[in-house]
Image (cartoon, rainbow, N blue to C red):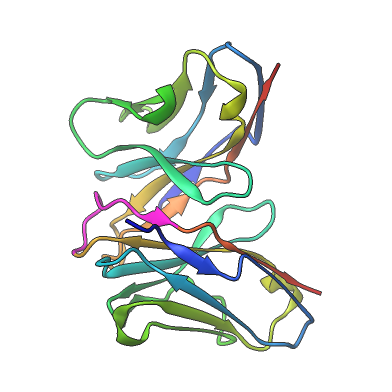
Amino acid sequence: EAGVTQFPSHSVIEKGQTVTLRCDPISGHDNLYWYRRVMGKEIKFLLHFVKESKQDESGMPNNRFLAERTGGTYSTLKVQPAELEDSGVYFCASSRPGLAGSNTQYFGPGTRLTVL
Amino acid sequence: AQSVTQLDSQVPVFEEAPVELRCNYSSSVSVYLFWYVQYPNQGLQLLLKYLSGSTLVKGINGFEAEFNKSQTSFHLRKPSVHISDTAEYFCAVSDSLTSGTYKYIFGTGTRLKVLA
């Protein structure tokens, strides 16, 4: 079974540009989460999809961030326009159908975003 | 709001010595607790989790953790570490109190450096 995959692994962009991160969850996993780790800080929740619906986007920093999950499969996270403080590692995680605290989240390798 | 504290940002230890990585959480309700490990240039991998039952949880690679409700702690231990255990370790709690998303609340991570 393939794990969670993320693309690209690294992205370096100039301030003001647009970047789109992609996450492919484990097949059959309805729950998809985005997290971010800014250097030196903790990993923080951004948002949660159940299939194609946003269940919770309380962690999204501002309206420069747009997440989509068309068809309930892969998800994209777009940052437009990027700012310096958006630099960090963006993790995607997925878990099996249903909502339970016991559901293990499986994480991808992350996308390291650097905004210059 | 729930929070997770990992007091030690870095822990150096000699090979074959025991190690304990500390984690404390704040919650007055039942929680689900997780330890993840991130090896260099890889994603987060689940080490072990506490859901209920026995307070001593065994995980992969010889790690174990003990859930202590009175002290709100979930410390990770290994009796004898190897060079290959060098990695960053994250403690997380599944947040069931808000919005029902069961998003993770992470600590800031502990970098374990095993010395030859």
Q: Which residue lies at the image location 63% right of the left edge and 44% below the top edge?
A: B40
- Image coordinates of residue B15 in percent, x first then y, are 63, 15
Please say if B70 is above or below B93. above
Residue in front for this viewpoint, B20 or A51: A51
Q: Is residue B1 among the parts visible in the rendering? A: no
| Magenta region, main secondary structure | loop
Q: Which residue lies at the image location 27% right of the left edge and 77% below the top edge?
A: A51
**In the image, B85: left or right of B72?**
right
For the C terminus of chain A, the image quarter is: bottom right
Residue in front for this viewpoint, B80 or B55: B80
Question: Hey, which quadrant is residue A28 in on the image?
Answer: bottom left
Question: Hey, which quadrant is residue B24 in on the image?
Answer: top left
Please say if B17 is above or below B99. above
For the N terminus of chain A, the image quarter is: bottom left
**In the image, B69: left or right of A85?**
left
- Image coordinates of residue A15 in percent, x first then y, are 78, 82
- Which region is colored magenta? A98-107
- Image coordinates of residue A91 in percent, x first then y, are 51, 62
Please say if A31 is above or below B71. below
Q: Which residue lies at the image location 58% right of the left edge and 46% below the top edge?
A: B108
Q: Is residue A106 magenta?
A: yes
